[in-house]
Amino acid sequence: MDTPNSGTARLDYAEYEDEELVEIVRQAGPGDTRAFEALLERHQSRVLTNCRYMTRSSANAEDLAQEVFVRAYFGLAKFRGDAAFGTWVRRIKVNHCLNFIRKQERRSGEISLETPGVEAHEAVREEPGAAETLESLDERGRIDGVLDEMVDTLRIPLLMRDLDEMSYREIADALGIGLSAAKMRVKRGRAEFREKYESRFGGLGGEDGGTET
Amino acid sequence: MTDANDRDDGRVQRIADLSMEPPAGFHRRVRRGVNRRVLAGDLTHFSLAGLAHAFLEYLTALFGFAASARASGAPPSDEVDTDE
């Protein structure tokens, strides 16, 4: 494969597909991250966004996203190309964020993500959000505020489904719960998001008014 | 990814559209994270061909530098860290 190895050829990496870049990274010398940075450029926003909403913290998201990409770099030997590079990185990200959240849960004694049946009743803990200040925020801030108020047991499956576009089976496997529980948590998460948002800011309108199937 | 049998129309579009720009210096942070592990001896991600190539480059640079230093009579200079 013809590879752009000179230091002035960074722009050329943009012409390569992800899988070609992976091969270039593997062939590069230790610590030569130029081709990897092209992959980073393509996927960083998605990974950062997901880490931010999974953990409710921009500072944590930056640390976690950095660790996700470092893990991805050193895990490339195991990347066989069965799935797209982006899907593979997403898997690393989901596992890394869930481990982080579980550690936090253990420390704080919160209801675990794996707690069976938690999606079926109302005993999930309400986050102490800054509800009184949400009205003054812009649209993005409102969405952030409502999501950050939601409990992990509903927010995380919702994010996995609607932000990460994971299948229900993938969500169930990642969270260690059953398929029907995963579906129920997503459904309840969507309902709770809409309810909280609408009660504060009025109807979601348009495409967000869709009915659950 | 969702497949055809897994699709539903209850998606919250506002969540699907969320996007966050990386902070300044994010690439540098990742690069440093990688370099720290490489310096600690983690070479697990490299193919044998990549390692052989890197080793050859190292030898070439080493002997090329030594030959050039002998020819010019210049003393070896300190290593310069070019990383940001």
Image: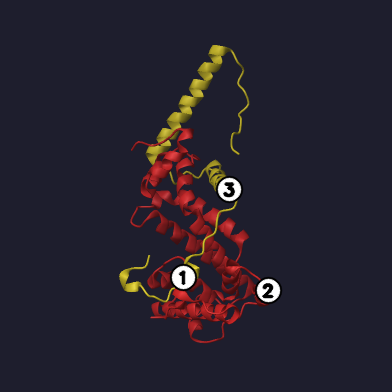
Chain letter belonging to callout 2: A
Residue at (48, 86) in percent of width and height: A120
Mark before the other along the chain sequence, 3 or 1? 1
Circle 3 sits in a helix, a strand or a loop, which is it?
helix
Q: Nearer the viewer, residue B9 or A157?
A: B9
CA separation in Å, label 3 and label 2: 34 Å
Rendering colour (chain A): red
Instruction: Name the mark on residue A133.
Output: 2
Vertical arrangement, residue A29 with respect to residue A80, above or below: above
Q: Which mark is residue A97?
A: none
Q: Is residue A196 left or right of residue A26?
A: right
Q: Is residue A26 visible?
A: no
Q: Which mark is residue B29?
A: 3
Identify the mark at residue B13; answer none if there is no mark: 1
Q: Which chain is yellow?
A: B
Discs 3 and 1 carry the same chain letter: yes
